[in-house]
Image (spheres, rainbow, N blue to C red):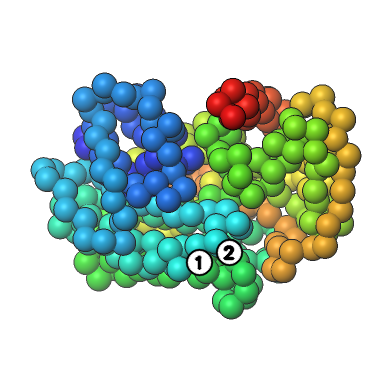
Amino acid sequence: MRAVVTGGAGFLGSHLTDRLLREGWDVLIIDNLITGSTDNISHHSGNERLKFIKQDVTEYLFVDGEVDFIFHFASPASPIDFIRMPIPVLKVGALGTHKALGLAKAKNAKFMLASTSEVYGDPLVSPQPETYWGNVNPIGPRGVYDEAKRYAEAMTMAYHHFHGLDTRIVRFFNTYGPRMRLDDGRVVPNFLAQALTGKPITIYGDGSQTRSFGYVEDIVEGVWRLANADFHEPVNIGTEDEHTVLEFAKIVLEVTGSKSAIEFMPALPDDPKQRRPDLTRNQQVLNKWSPNVILKDGLKRTADYFQGRLDLRASVS
């Protein structure tokens, strides 16, 4: 089997690449490294079953040979990216998805879109089932990502219905683990980096907003099961282990042993108040998939990774 993974040098894409290689697949990564890094795949150096092309996936994609599966995982995915690079976020969701789907059609390959719980916006129901259409502000600061992914889902389903393409859509909820960027801007790297460096942990709003955190190893297992399932509508992959952001900050302090203070900042616009997946469809489609890594254990592994990155940064500065 041979797969193309767009965004394969990113956080999720690189962990998916690890899994595909372990399963005996050949993998071609296409990534422009706008947020990814070859450090994330350097442990595969010399592996002839892994190839890398540095390219923007919004441009024409040409791949020699047969391809069995395309995993479209390319996209900046953190709030600071939405501010710094809103146009690339929109383009990779629209043009990039179109190009990746076109490649899948040309190669008669299966296709998976990495979508997100952000398609639900600031939800009016909780937990969020895949049948919920969302509450999204299309012109707000998060709109570039929310609407790019909603458009990408519509494009994927159009290719499925019109061209008969064998597609899948995964909606990721908050996923964390090693290889996240230190400056990612999302809650896990923010809190861990602040705790490990003794800086105050900054909470935007009163901390009552909730998140459900899934460890990347568990999430990739869900992706693998979806890739091998015969199902074409969106599927939530995440954990029902829901915490307020304030509770999560206290867990980070406990795991790291940090003495950092907690500071409250003004709430961010359109910040979702609740994030928890309804996993009813997930359980039906993914053969009763469930996460194995408990939050404190996953955070400890992630904190160890971040500490290593911080030590490396200090040694070269």
Residue 208 image position (x, y, % from top left): 84, 54
Distance CA(mark 1)–CA(mark 2): 6 Å
Q: Which residue is mark 2?
A: 83
Q: Is residue 225 left or right of residue 54?
A: right
Residue plotted at (32% across, 28% down): 21
Q: Residue at x 31, y 61 (%)?
A: 58
Q: Amino acid at mark 1?
A: Pro
Up/down of 45 relative to 136, above or below: above
User: What residue sits 58% from the left and 64% below the top?
Assistant: 83
Which quadrant, please, contains the C terminus?
A: top right
Q: Is residue 155 left or right of residue 81?
A: left
Circle 1 packing at 10 Å, graded few (<14), some (14-19), many (20+), is some
Residue 100 seen in the current view: yes
Amino acid marked by disc 2: Ile
Q: Are marks 1 and 2 in contact (CB under 8 Å)?
A: yes
Residue 109 drawn at (x, y percent): 21, 50
The x, y position of residue 117, in whole percent, is 57, 57
In the rendered image, which quarter is residue 313 located in?
top right
Image location of residue 52, percent across then percent down: 27, 38
Q: Say which of 203 and 16 sits in front.
A: 203
Q: Is disc 1 placed on a helix, strand or loop?
A: helix
Q: Which residue is mark 1?
A: 86
Most extreme residue toward the bottom is 139
